Amino acid sequence: MAEQREMKEKNPWHSAVVILITVLGITAIVALVTTAVLQNKPLLQKYKYGIVLDAGSSHTAVYIYEWPAEKENDTGRVHQKHICKVLGPGISSYSHSPELAGESLRTCMKQAERFVPIRRHRETPLYLGATAGMRLLSMENQNVCDQVLGSVEKVLRSTPFSYQGARIISGQEEGAFGWITINYLDDRLKQGSGTTGALDLGGASTQITFATNQEGMGESAENTVTFRLYGNDYILYTHSFLCYGKDQALKKTLAQQAQVGNSSVLDPCFNEGYSVDRNYSSVYSSPCIMAGKPLETGYSFTHIGKGDASQCQQAIRRIFTNPGCNFSRCSFNGVYQPPIQGPFGAFSAFYFVMNFLNLTSDSLEGTREKMERYCSTPWHQIKQQHPGVKEKYLAEYCFSGNYILSLLTDGYKFTSETWSTITFIKKISGSDAGWTLGYMLNLTNMIPAEAPDSPPLPHAGYVTLLLFISLVIFVIFLFSVKSLWPRCTTQTQII
Ligand SMILES: Nc1ncnc2c1ncn2[C@@H]1O[C@H](COP(=O)(O)OP(=O)(O)O)[C@@H](O)[C@H]1O
Ligand SMILES: [Ca+2]
C-alpha cells in the first residue's frame, strides 16, 4: 500500500490524467445529452386552426379550434381556442328577413379574424352546420330555408377563411359527432377501451348515442353508425328526436294543456305566482305541434303557474307517444333502442338546466325531491333568489328539470341504478362538449382509421435512458482506468 502511494506521489501524471479523463468524460456526456434533447425537441410550435359555426335553433356559436401543426393525427391535440356567441336568435328565426341571418354573424366573424393569426387565415377551414331549428324550417318552407342558408353563405364567403360550406346536418350526424367529440377529448379513442355515451339536449331536438356490441343492432339501420378510428371498430346506436328539444317539448306540453278559447291555462310546470299573457299562435307556431291546431289562433290566454312537479311530469309523459314497438325494445314514439350502455356524458341544455338546479351529482330520488321543492317555490321568491338570471330561463327551469327527468327515465329508460352513470358536463379539457369538434375532425380527416406509428419511447423517456446508459458506461470506464493504472505505472517503473 505504502509503496503504491509512494508511486502515485512520484508520478505527477497520475491525478492530472484522472482529472482530465473525468472532465472529458463529463463534457462528452453533457454534449451527448444536449444534442439528443435539442435534436428531438419539437421545432418552434406552429399551430393550425379550424372554425365551425353551430347554428342551433336558439342561437349560433362560432367555435375556433387550434392544434399543433405536426400533431394533427394525435388524439386530444385539437382544443377550443375561443367561442363567440352570436347576438340574437338562431338563424332559423330570420325567416321573415333571411338577409339578416347572415348579417348577424359578422361581429363574431370579425372576432375570429383576430383570434386566428393573419398568415393562417387563407388555409383555415370554415364550416357552418345547422341543426334542428333549420330542419323544422325546411319542413315548413324549403324556399325560405334556402334563402337563410344563402344569406349566411354570402357572409361566410366574404371572410378571409377557407369557406367549406353551410348545410343542415342530419340528426344522426349531430348525435355521432357529439359522441366523437367527448371521446376524443377524453382521449378514449386511441386506447380502444370503453367509451362514453353522449346525451345532447337542444331547443328543438335531443340526441342519444352510445357504443353497443348488441348483435341486434341490425334491427334498425337508420339508428346505426359505424366508425373505424385509430384501428378500433365502433358500432354506435344513435337517435335524434326532432321536436323533443326542450323548447319544442315545452310548446308540446303547453299545447296539450291548452284549449283554444279558454282564457287561462293553469300550468303545473311553472312556479306559483307566475302569470304571463300569451297568444295561442305562439304555442302553435311550430310544425312540431300538429294535433289540435286550430284554424283561428288569434286568441290570447293567461299562462298561470301552479308549481307541482309530479303533475308536471304527468303532463310531460303525455307528449311521449307509445304507438307500439316494432322492434325487440323501444325508447319512446316507437323508436328502437338497445339496452343503454353507460357511462354517459350529458351536455348542452342537460348541463345548463341541471347545473342551475344544483342537480349534477344527486341520485334519481334526490333529483325528484329537489325538483318538487324548486317547483313549489313561489315565483317572486325564485326571482329574488336569482336576480342575475335571464327571466325566460328562470321561469322555465321547473319545466326543464322535470322534462329532463322524464326524458331520461320514461323516455330513455334510465333507472335509479343507471342514473349514476350520467355525468352532466359542459367542457372537457377546456373544450365544449357538442357536435362541432367531431364534425371538424371528421371533415378534415384528423382521426385516421388506423393508429399512426409512434416511436417506442416518449421523448422524456428516451433522454432519461440515454443519460442513464451514458453514466453507466462512464462509471465502468472510470473503474477500469482505476484498476489498470497501478499496473501501467509499475511497468513504467520496471522499464
Ligand atoms: N343558461 C341556460 N339555461 C337554460 N337553458 C339554456 C341556457 N343556455 C342555453 N340554453 C338552452 O339550450 C338549448 C340549446 O339549444 P340549441 O343548440 O340552440 O338548439 P338545437 O340543438 O335543438 O338546434 C336551448 O333550449 C336554449 O334555450
Ligand atoms: Ca345544439
Image (cartoon, helix red, strand yellow):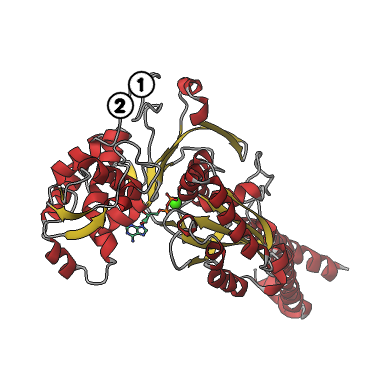
Label number found at residue 322: 2
Identity of the residue furthest to the right in this view:
495
Image quadrant in which the C terminus is located: bottom right
**97 to the left or right of 32:** left
The one nearer the camera, 68 or 13, is 68
Using a 10 Å C-alpha cutoff, classify the residue at mark 1 as few (fewer than 14 neighbours), some (14 to 19) or many (20 or more): some
Asked if disc 1 and disc 2 are in contact, CB closer than 8 Å, the reply is yes
User: In the rendered view, would you say 485 is above or below 133?
Assistant: below
Q: Which residue is mark 1?
A: 325
Distance from disc 1 to disc 2, alpha carbons, whole Å, reads 8 Å
Res 451 quadrant in image: top right
Decide if residue 368 is on the left or right side of residue 137: left
The amino acid type, in three-letter code, at marker 2 is: Asn
Image quarter (top left, top right, bottom left or bottom right) of the N terminus: bottom right
Crowd tier of the residue under label 2, counting other residues whose Cα lies within 10 Å: few below 14, some 14–19, many 20 or above: few
- Which residue is outermost to the front? 296
Tell whether circle 1 marks a residue whose Cβ is less than 8 angstroms from ligand 1.
Answer: no
Question: Label 1 is placed on what type of residue?
Answer: Cys
Is residue 467 something one can see in this rendering?
no
Residue plotted at (47% across, 26% down): 213
Residue 450 x/y as whole percent: 66, 39
Left or right position of 373 against 216: left
| The one of 17 and 386 positioned closer to us in this rendering | 386
What residue is rendered at 70% in x and 76% in y?
A: 6
Residue 342 x %, y % = 38, 37
Instruction: Depth check: give the residue in front, 274 or 239.
Output: 274
Ligand 1 quadrant? bottom left
Q: Secondary structure at mark 1?
A: loop
- In the rendering, at what x and y percent does residue 435 appear? 50, 49
Q: Dot 2: what SS?
A: loop
Residue 383: % across, % down = 18, 67
Query: Going 21% across and 59% down the picture, which residue do you hit?
Result: 277
